[in-house]
Image (cartoon, rainbow, N blue to C red):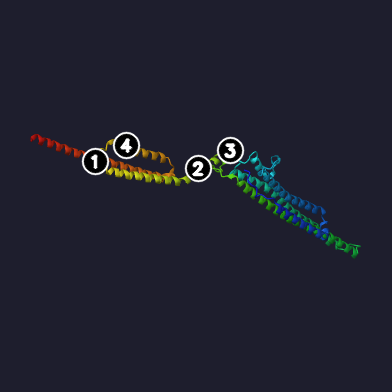
Amino acid sequence: MRAETQGFSQPIQQVVLMLTSLLLVMVGSYFMFPSVAPIFLSSPYLNGIILTVFFFGILCCFWQIFVIIAAVNWVENFALDRPGHEFSDPPRLLIPLASLLKGKKSKTILTSSSLNSILDSVATRLNEARDITRYVINLLIFLGLLGTFYGLAITVPEVVNTIKSLVPKEGQTGIEVFDNLMAGLEGQLGGMGTAFASSLLGLAGSLVVGLLELFANHGQNRFYMQLEEWLSSFTSIGIFGDSENVDESTSNGNTSPIISAIGAQISELGQMFEKSIENNSTTNNQINSLSKAIEEVAGSQLTSSKTVSSIDGFDKNSIEKLVSSQQDLNTLIKGQFGERSTRDLENLTRLRNIEVQLSRLVDELANARKDALSELRSDLAQLSKAMIDLARNSSKG
């Protein structure tokens, strides 16, 4: 099972893209901070919470990449059988796979149900990490909106107070009324600054974390596909299907070695069938040669049957021996090819035709023998009658 791991690769490209994105964000923030610092400092507590969540989202994205790096290292160490890999703890992402492959060596073969179970478990763990970053993105958007509403909640009362302060009271001068207007506008601007700063910081943070999550997800998907290809390289299709009973018995650990052994035997049987198919052509050629030889024998027997009538010493034992030899030949042919599979049905048909022809030859030979005997008896009867007549004539003379 120590398959090659050429398909696995570290997510170096994703790490470079993530670091480049963070570097660009830091450079842009450095140049923009002097102009927007008063706005952000108007609500330091809320903006501090948003920044804390933002940095937590960044750490989650990089943690996903670090998990992929650790998983790739573990798979490479296991597949290449590097010294000391038995003592290293598998990453949380590959705990199901490590439990299945624990103690197994080069003879480990996964079934399709085991492959699906492992891939489903890995996909579930990847989705759990993605859910955290997605929640962080939504939380940043929520905090930005919360800051917006908080700023509006500060601005609206300040507008009302400013309008009320414009009404001059007894003993107030115009300068005092103007001072009240300035104080009200300052409070309104502070609330608007809180709203804009929180909204901008939350939306910008969600955008950056979403971009980092996109790169991290790309690395996770790439690892998932590579893991699927690697596991598929030593996965066999089960002969019993993926029924629930088979899954239960496999989970108990009782029948998986038996299924593996049966699969190996079936593979060997398939190779034997392939060799049998290759030998069919040779067998057919041999059968054709045998058929030609039998036809030659049949031709010689036909020639012999034509000369039987002219042979006076042709006895019954010779005929019976010939018939017996033909029966032995038929029995031998049937014993050799009678147990062949359905693929040799055509050959068996040809042998039956040959048997029929031989039977016809035997019948013709028997008929020729009967004709010869009848003719011989007729000649003997005529000869006897002639001798009797001759004897009578000689006695009379």
Mark toward the viewer: 2 or 3: 2
Q: Which residue is mark 4?
A: 321
Alpha carbon separation for disc pair 2 and 3: 23 Å
Mark toward the viewer: 2 or 1: 1
Mark toward the viewer: 4 or 3: 4
Residue 257's mark?
3
Please name the amino acid that badge 1 sits on.
Ala
Corner quadrant of residue 286:
top left
Mark toward the viewer: 3 or 1: 1
Mark toward the viewer: 4 or 2: 4
Name the residue at the bottom extreme. Answer: 174
The answer to whether 1 appears left or right of 311 in the picture is right
Alpha carbon separation for disc pair 2 and 1: 56 Å
Residue 342 % position (x, y): 43, 44
Alpha carbon separation for disc pair 3 and 1: 75 Å
In-front residue for pair 394/232:
394
Q: Which residue is mark 1?
A: 372
Dot 1 falls on a residue whose secondary structure is helix
| Mark closer to the chain start, 4 or 2 | 2
Q: Which residue is mark 2?
A: 272
Please rate how many residues cluster around mark 1, counting C-alpha atoms within 10 Å: few if below 14, some from 14 to 19, many from 20. Answer: some
Dot 2 falls on a residue whose secondary structure is helix
Can see residue 94? yes
Please rate how many residues cluster around mark 3, counting C-alpha atoms within 10 Å: few if below 14, some from 14 to 19, many from 20. Answer: few
Please name the amino acid that badge 4 sits on.
Lys
Residue 218 % position (x, y): 68, 53
Q: Which residue: 55% across, 41% down? A: 264
Residue 319's mark?
none
